[in-house]
Image (tube, helix red, strand yellow):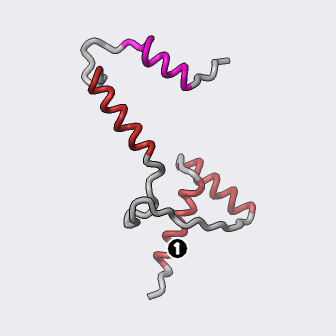
Amino acid sequence: MTKKKTYEDAARWAEDDMVLPENSKTARRGSAAAEVGRALLARAHAGRPSLDPHAEPGTESPRRQVRLPIAVSEQVDAIAQAQGRRAAEVMREAITLYVKDNAIR
């Protein structure tokens, strides 16, 4: 059985034990590495990306809840797993397509 890695383990490895290839064209070092790291943390700190590309920054998407028959729920889960997606993404896409096809004009 392998030991579960913690954040501290990963940080210790990155700071002390990791060895970068001498002539690496992709590895960043020094201030360049710090700059990339800060940019990555800033993006992560901004939170989850908006579901609505037209929404104002900081606008939360409304949450809806729906009960599904067990068979439908299981099919949603199976589709999500087969596509490597979350069930919420599958349902969001299905609802979006339904609304597009049935829009009241």
Above or below residue 105? Residue 4 is above
Residue 67 appears in which quarter of the rendering? Answer: bottom right
- Is label 1 in a helix, a strand or a loop? helix
Q: Is residue 13 magenta?
A: yes
**Measuring 59% from the left and 65% from the top, which residue is drawn there?**
63
Q: Which residue is mark 1?
A: 98
Establish if 5 lies above or below 66: above
Q: How many marks?
A: 1
Which secondary structure is most common in the magenta stretch? helix
Q: Nearer the viewer, residue 83 or 37?
A: 37
Q: Residue 88: x, y in percent? A: 58, 57
- Comparing 105 with 71, the one in front is 105
Q: What residue is shown at x 50% (from left), y 75% (from top)?
A: 99
Position of the C terminus by quadrant:
bottom left
Q: Quadrant of the N terminus?
A: top right
Q: Which segment is the magenta one?
A: 7-19
Q: Is residue 32 left or right of residue 74?
A: left
Residue 15 x, y percent position in the rendering: 43, 16
Expressed as whole percent of the image width and height from the top left, the position of residue 27 reads: 31, 23
In terms of image quadrants, where is residue 57?
bottom left
Amino acid carrying mark 1 in the image? Tyr
User: Where residue 74 sits in the image (x, y, percent)?
Assistant: 69, 56
Q: Is residue 96 above or below residue 103?
A: above
Q: Residue at x 31, y 26 (%)?
A: 33
- Judged from this view, the residue extending furthest toward the bottom is 105
Q: Is 57 placed left or right of 8 in the picture?
A: left
Residue under the point 55% across and 67% down: 62
